[in-house]
Each structure stands twice: as structure tokens, then as C-alpha cells.
Image: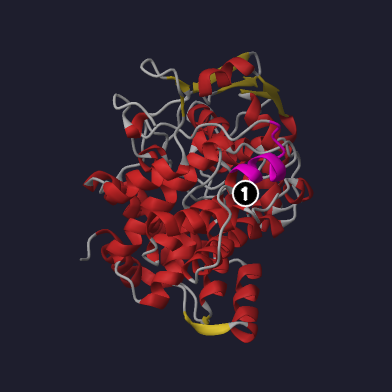
Amino acid sequence: MRCAQENLYHRKLTNCHYCNELIMTTLNDVLTWLSTTRAPVTVRERACLLILDCLGCMIAGSRAPEVKRLATLQARLDPGTIVLPGSTEAVSMSAAAFRFALATCRDEACEGLARAHGRPGVAAIAAIWSLGTQMGASREKMVDALIVGYEVGSRLGEVMRIKKGMHVDGTFTCLGAAAAAAHMLDLGPQGIHAAVQISAIQMPSTLYLPIREGADSRNTYLAHAASLGLQSAISASAGLIAPTDGVSEAYQITLGHDHPLPSLPAIDHWHLMDGYFKPWAAVRHVHYGAAAGLQLRQALTGTDQLDAVRLFIYEEAVVYCANRAPRTTIQAQFSLTWGLAAMLVLGDLGPEAFSPEALANQKIRDLESLITVVAEPALGANGMRSAKLEVDVGSQTHRSFVDRVLGDPDMPMSNDDVIAKFLRYARPSLGEKLANEWVHQILHAS
């Protein structure tokens, strides 16, 4: 029995001063906290913004030719009653969840959480959007479910680090989706725990390989996570028996760790408040070099001949985004050099910067070939993400340094920033009036 002096919601992996007992934060602790603590208004408002941002990314991604073809096939092979915003096809609940997540990450403009090295929100939102639509659930019900899924998924994601050669999108994200969907089904802490375990025992081991080869099948990872989480919650609701600790088994067997699952992060704040929104498309690691490029772009003229460009950046960015001379959209989205070159040429990194038209832009390609990238461990010390940029123009060297970008916790996007991004992404599909109606419905309607 734990000592009375211990604070239930602030356990850390340490020896207790009073009873010399090893104390850990467990999934059960997190679920108990979530069942007894109502999120404050600021967290609920943040959840609404996250839903809006993912919705905008989904609508924009749905315009891609391959996503349109998927929607057509789903409507023929897996029909139903759910029509996603920006689409006309009526599909089943599972098909809607799958396509919602796939389209949301298609442009690489959606949310993330640095400490989890992934995106705890996308799969959870995709699962509860389709389930909530099927159930006729209220916005408040969806917000509650997202908060539960995000807090569970982000804490598991922080400790469930992936092996070399894997991609994080298809791993821990299904666990948060399961928790969110189970909460939507009113399962309570025990039922949510069961749904997470059912998802964990079949958690995928997704690979980085498609990005290296330029294959957009990577976008099915979050789609699978949403579907798996949704069906795991339905299975738990039906009373299928879950193992007691599938999460720990998945940690050691699926992810290949040779030690037990670590303590989950202490329950001392809401992780949802630490997540970032992206002002630009492309994987987050690309943003730091691109931001440094945007700083220097203001000092350069359109006629300047750049002789050399050197990007110094933290090591993790180089590991994940070393793709050179990208041939496809997803390779470009995971390319430090392409993101920097496109920013220097275009002055923006919207989805258009990674389109087939941009990939055919010879000016961007020529500039991308000039860039050298150097991994500098000091730029990632203590969890920091930062970049240095040097550009040689004749005898002059222009320099810039970036240690935060818009969307980081200490430099957050404002509500107006997120709304403006949503409108930019959604207007081409919805039109001005309907896009503004969605903003009102998600952020303001009762």
C-alpha cells in the first residue's frame, strides 16, 4: 500500500522518502485523474482549436487526386451515411475515420507534440469525428473525448520511443484513438483501459521506408491508427476481454525495448497545452531551417546570386529529413533542403510548395542542390530545437539563427492565426460562407 504522503497525481519514478517504495505513474493513474478532473476552460478551448485545425488539414488533403479516388472507392465498396466536410461521398463510420486521418496528414500541416515525437491528436479526432457523427454526439462530448484521448496518447507516446527505421505515426497513436473512442462510448476508466490494451496488443510497427522511397502510402499509418482505435473501443464496449497490460508487452516486443515500460510522465499539467499547430506544411523538423531562411530572405534581393548555403541543425532533424532532390510530395515534405530552398524562393511553405508544380520549379531545384546540411548536437541539447543558416553572396556571408518557430509552446499561434489557417485550407472546397460556419460551430456554438 502506498504511503499517505504521496500525491496520487504527481508520482515520479523515484524512491519514496517515507516508505522507500518505487513509485510510478501508470495508465490507471492517468485514467483515474481524467475521470475525476474536469479540464479547465483554457484546455477545452485548445481542444476546439485542435479540432478546427485538423478539420482544415483534412479538407485540404481531400483535394489531392489520390484521396479523391479513395473517397470514390469507399463510397462504392464501403458505403454508409457519413459525409466528411469537403466531400460528397457517403461512407461507413470506419471508412470515414480512415479517410479523415489519411487526408489530415496528407499535406504534413497538422498538429504535433514534440515531447511525444508525434501527433497524439489526428487519429483520436478522426475516430471520434466519425463515431460522434454516427451517434449524433454534441460538440462538448467530442471535446471531452479528445481531451481523454490526447492525454492518454501523449503520455504513452512520450515513453514508447520507436526503433531505428520506424515511423511513429502508426505506433502509439492508436492508443490515444482507442481511449478517445472509448470515452465517447461512455465506457469509464476500466473500459477505456480495456480499449487501450486491445489496441496495444495489435499496435503496428510502421516503417520509415515509404518516405525514403517517396511512397505516399505512409499516409495510411494514422488512418490505420484511427480505425484500430475505433474498433478496439467498440470491442471493449461489446465486452471482449482485454489483457491486463498489453501496453507493456507492446513496448518490449513490438518496439523491441529490453527493459520494462518506464513510468508515464507525472500528472502535473495538461499535455494538450504543450502541443503545436503548424503555420506551414512539411514535417516540423523542416520548419526551423525554413524559418531561418525566411529571416534571411528579407535581407536578400531577387537578383542576388547565392554562392553557397549552409544549414546547421539538430541531429534528429537530419535523421528524419535528409531526403535530397525529392521526386515526390512526401519526400519533399521530409526534406530539410527542399523546405529551405522553397522558402527562399517562394517566401511561404503552404501545401503548394510541395506540389508537382513546385517540384518542377527549376529555380527551387537549383537552389536545393547548393545547400549543405550539418548536424550539430548542441543545437538539440536539452530537448531544444534550433537551426543556424549561412548564405554566401559574393564576398558577404549572411547569417540567421532560430530556436523557436510559430506554434512552439513559447511562441504559440493565436486563435486568429489558427482560424486564418483553417480558412486558407478550407475555402477552396467549402467557399467563404460554409468555412466561416464551421469556425463558428466548432469554436463558438453551444
Residue 322 makes an appearance in the image: yes
Residue 362 pos. (x, y %): 72, 46
Q: Quadrant of the C terminus?
A: bottom left
Instruction: Name the residue at 62% across, 61% down.
Output: 224
Q: 58 or 267: nearer the eye? A: 267
Residue 439 pos. (x, y %): 30, 62
Q: 101 or 314: nearer the eye? A: 101
The magenta stretch spans residue 252 = yes
User: As displayed, is residue 262 above or below residue 278?
Assistant: above
User: As displayed, is residue 431 above or below residue 5?
Assistant: below
Residue under label 1: 171
Q: Quadrant of residue 335?
A: top right
Instruction: Name the residue at 35% across, 67% down.
Output: 435
For label 1, the SS is: loop
* Furthest residue toward front: 1
Horizontal arrangement in the rendering, residue 214 relative to residue 119 (left or right)? right
The magenta stretch spans residue 45 = no
Residue 425 makes an appearance in the image: no
Q: Quadrant of residue 15?
A: top left
Q: Which residues are magenta?
A: 248-258
User: As displayed, is residue 402 above or below residue 100?
Assistant: above
Q: 272 or 58: nearer the eye? A: 272
Secondary structure predominantly adopted by residues drawn in magenta: helix
Q: How is the image coloured?
A: secondary structure
Residue 20 pos. (x, y %): 44, 17
**Looking at the image, how many numbered discs can be counted on the residues?**
1
Q: Quadrant of residue 373?
A: top right
Instruction: Name the residue at 67% across, 51% down.
Output: 330
Residue 408 pos. (x, y %): 42, 34
- Kind of residue at badge 1: Thr
Horizontal arrangement in the rendering, residue 444 relative to residue 161 (left or right)? left
